[in-house]
Image: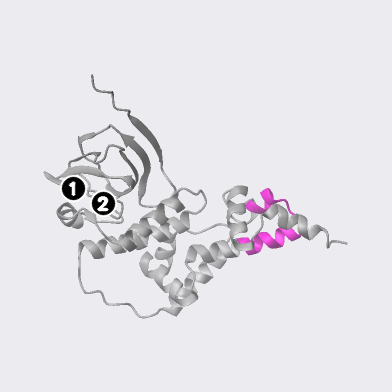
Amino acid sequence: MAARQHVTQEVTAWRPRVPGVTEVFHAHFTGYAYPMHVHDAWTLLIVDDGAVRYDLDRHEHGTPDDTVSLLPPHVPHNGSPATADGFRKRVVYLDGALLGDDLIGAAVDGPDLRDPLLRRRVGQLHASLARAGDELEAESRLTLIGERLRGLLRPRLVTQRPPDPALARSLRELLDERVADGLVLEEAARLLHAHPAHLVRAFSGAYGIAPHQYLMSRRVGRARRLLLDGVPPGETAAATGFYDQAHLTRHFRRLVGVTPGRYRVSSARYVT
């Protein structure tokens, strides 16, 4: 009698506060196969371990670990492990705001995209989506992913836009006004009458830093001043726009090298 195959089904799912993302889904499956089904959203899929075999529009496809798969909405597909050890995957479901219906045909014809830059960006997106308080970073990364996907699905000569220092300066001023309150990229694009991807590129080109990195730097700068004034880290986090104290600690340690608590204690010895 054959040994019964071990079945693993580990799932984590959540809905982040990021425009355009309807769900984030991380899963580890062995011995499980999806039946034919459809989604009403775009499925942006990467596989970290193993591989998935699936049928889309009656054609078989696969997902090695250097591939980004983009499955369009309303098109039936299934999915099953391509190896005995199953697979680990990370999925972002996207509404139609990022990718239009005009790209569905191209995605059906070529859903598996071998593009190292896109693969790296999708991985970075997942990392930022997993951190509460880093929604601006996630939104910035998502808009560049959308631009990359459109370019891959609609190959064409792309004319590089010239530098736009005035737009970069306007975005910096807007970020300076919203250090504590925060800003979503969609709102910035609307206020400055520019495409989100162009906003990110203009700012990064002008200042050598992404908008979300600039905002976090400003927040940490304010946090340092409050901590030196003796304000506890929890109150400092709330006053400077961080999601919570853990969010402050993560970014503070990255930029300053120590935790807010140690930074605050170190300053006390100089107070007379």
Say if mark 1 contacts mark 2, CB within 8 Å: yes
Q: Which span of residues is magenta-colored? A: 220-237
Q: Is residue 102 left or right of residue 27?
A: left
Residue 216 x %, y %: 56, 61
Colour style of the rendered protein structure: one colour
Give the residue at mark 1. Answer: 61
Q: Secondary structure at mark 2?
A: strand
Q: Main secondary structure of the magenta part?
A: helix
State the image coordinates of residue 72 (x, y, percent, origin top left): 22, 49
Q: Nearer the viewer, residue 256 or 137?
A: 256
> What's under tag 2, amino acid-wise?
Ser
- Quarter of the image where the C terminus is located: bottom right
Q: Amino acid at mark 1?
A: His
Residue named by callout 2: 69
Check the image and name the residue furthest to the top. 1
Work out which residue is located at the far right of the displayed protein and give it. 272
